[in-house]
Image: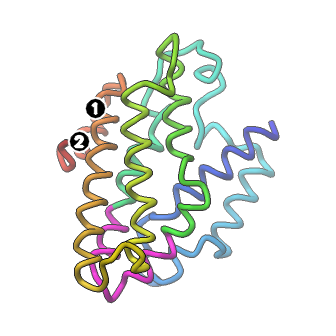
Amino acid sequence: MKFSAVITLSLLTSAIAFAPAPISNASTALNMNNDQTRRAALFTIATGAVVSTFPSAAFAIGNASPTYENMKQIPQFGASLQNLKEKAGNPDTSEDALVGLRSFNKDPNFYTGYARNFISKSVKNDADGDARVGYIRQASKIVSSVQELLEGRQGLTGADASKEAVVRVEKAQALIGKFVAECGVEDARFGPYIAAHPY
């Protein structure tokens, strides 16, 4: 149970990093230390509410077919990048984007591990080497790189850095779409994301 709670907390913080900001207070939405985030994390740990955010116990031990619920965090990660793209694409809001990026970069391999866990249930050997896990690994590296880009450590600044950030985020979204399309789960809820981010 302790292991599941730790994974859930990590999932929660990673998923919130780029979550769409509420209309009323966009500046604090990306703040991983805000009270709402802490309360949600504490509630999850205190109640053991793992099933809603992490694959079910049955799937975790390979007794059930993978479903939307087993891997929905991956397309949700992709959808959350829309908020990053909008903020990073505007030099006036790039500092807001950096807040989420710094949070993401505390555990940049989280979604790769999540994807590997999911794929390991459907392949006999070498889930880590599976091309689909590679899509998420590459997408995560791209997202991670946007922090240095916006901080001016990659030779671009201002509007040029913002333009490059948008290109990178769109590439990451497309890679996530490719994973979703090839993950083996057929669900109509994936359709809009895949259509919006063709690879």
Mark 2 and mark 1 residues within 8 Å of each other at the beta carbon:
yes
Quadrant in the rendering for residue 162: bottom left
Q: Amino acid at mark 2?
A: Ile
The numbered mark at residue 194 is 2
Q: Is residue 195 magenta?
A: no
The numbered mark at residue 91 is none
Residue span colored magenta: 82-100
Badge 2 density bin: few <14, some 14–19, many ≥20, Cα 10 Å: many
Colour logic: rainbow
Residue 136 in the image: x percent, y percent? 41, 41
- The residue labelled by disc 1 is 181
Q: Quadrant of the C terminus?
A: top left
Name the main secondary structure of what is drawn in magenta. helix
Q: Which sits earlier in the primary sequence, circle 2 or circle 1?
A: 1
The residue positioned farthest toward the bottom in the image shown:
92
Residue sitting at x 54%, y 38%:
114
Residue 47 in the image: x percent, y percent? 77, 47
Q: Amino acid at mark 1?
A: Ala
The residue positioned farthest toward the front in the image shown:
155
Badge 1 density bin: few <14, some 14–19, many ≥20, Cα 10 Å: many
Q: Please, what secondary structure does the residue beneath circle 1 have?
A: helix
Q: Please, what secondary structure does the residue beneath circle 2 have?
A: helix
